Image (tube, coloured by chain):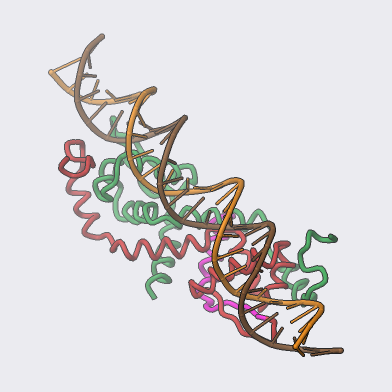
Chain colours: A green, B red, C brown, D orange
Amino acid sequence: MGGEGVCEVEYVNKKAVQEVKFRMLGDKTFLKTAGCFKILGDSTRVKILHALSIKELCVCDLSALLGMTHSAVSHQLRLLRNTNLVKFRKEGKIVYYSLADKHVVKLIDMGIEHAEE
Amino acid sequence: MGGEGVCEVEYVNKKAVQEVKFRMLGDKTFLKTAGCFKILGDSTRVKILHALSIKELCVCDLSALLGMTHSAVSHQLRLLRNTNLVKFRKEGKIVYYSLADKHVVKLIDMGIEHAEE
DNA sequence: CACCCATATGAATATATGCTCATATGTTCA
DNA sequence: TGAACATATGAGCATATATTCATATGGGTG
């Protein structure tokens, strides 16, 4: 089976493939990049990030804004925290979330732009 | 149940929520934006798009480059076609794919940049 | 302390998604 | 026409993911 049945005998433009392979980035880079986009690939999370780009908000605010349960919002916020997209500060029992990084806004804005064209 | 159990009695910073709600974009926009990111949220697809940003390639080239079956690659290409991220031209039985839109490259590059920081 | 409330989280479930396998389509060439 | 091959696609399966439900944590207040 040579190379796990992948394009052994069939047509391949070897030169082109080699050139591209040479200029490809590492697997890890693609994984991290895709991971980053995966986070943005859910409308709930995009909404949350967009909202937080306007104003710092607490979980209850967000759940009121989005019409979702606290739990659902909290789960998504955990994801956004774990990926360092949002930060938070506590004021008594209230937890205020805000963007960790304005960089993400640019990414989202580009996504919006692309989606709306 | 009033408002489906979402932040009815509990704490909400009404003013902040109203202000943000006023400035939020429409649901459709968020769905489309997230949909766009969802496509980029898979490392196989990011690899394909990155490869095609270097050089036009056929299915077999791509499957050789990525070490994946033709079928897997073809399925992903269909997705990328349906979302207008790639275009193709036929040369006999060979189908050459290329980017439909250089815009996407900028998005991916930003993602890479963000992922690698 | 006892209770309320804002938030967090684990388990469960329903749905989405990526790949494989089998098969179909369409082109080239003998 | 028939064989070979590049690509496409449907079904099935395994895994990932978003939400719900139940429950935990922890601060505020009586």
At a point 34% along the width and 38% down the height, the residue shown is A71
Residue B92 at x, y percent in the picture:
69, 87
- The residues colored magenta run B95-116
D6 vs C21: above or below: below
Q: Is residue A115 magenta?
A: no
Horizontal side of A21 relative to A99 (left or right) equals right
Assign the C terminus of chain A to one quadrant of the image: bottom left
A54 vs A24: above or below: above
At a point 70% along the width and 62% down the height, the residue shown is B68
At a point 52% along the width and 71% down the height, the residue shown is B104
A44 vs D30: above or below: below
Horizontal side of B55 relative to A67 (left or right) equals right
Magenta residues, dominant SS class: helix
Assign the N terminus of chain A to one quadrant of the image: bottom right
Q: In this view of the protein, which residue sits in the foreground, B17 or B101?
A: B101
Residue A31 at x, y percent in the picture:
61, 54
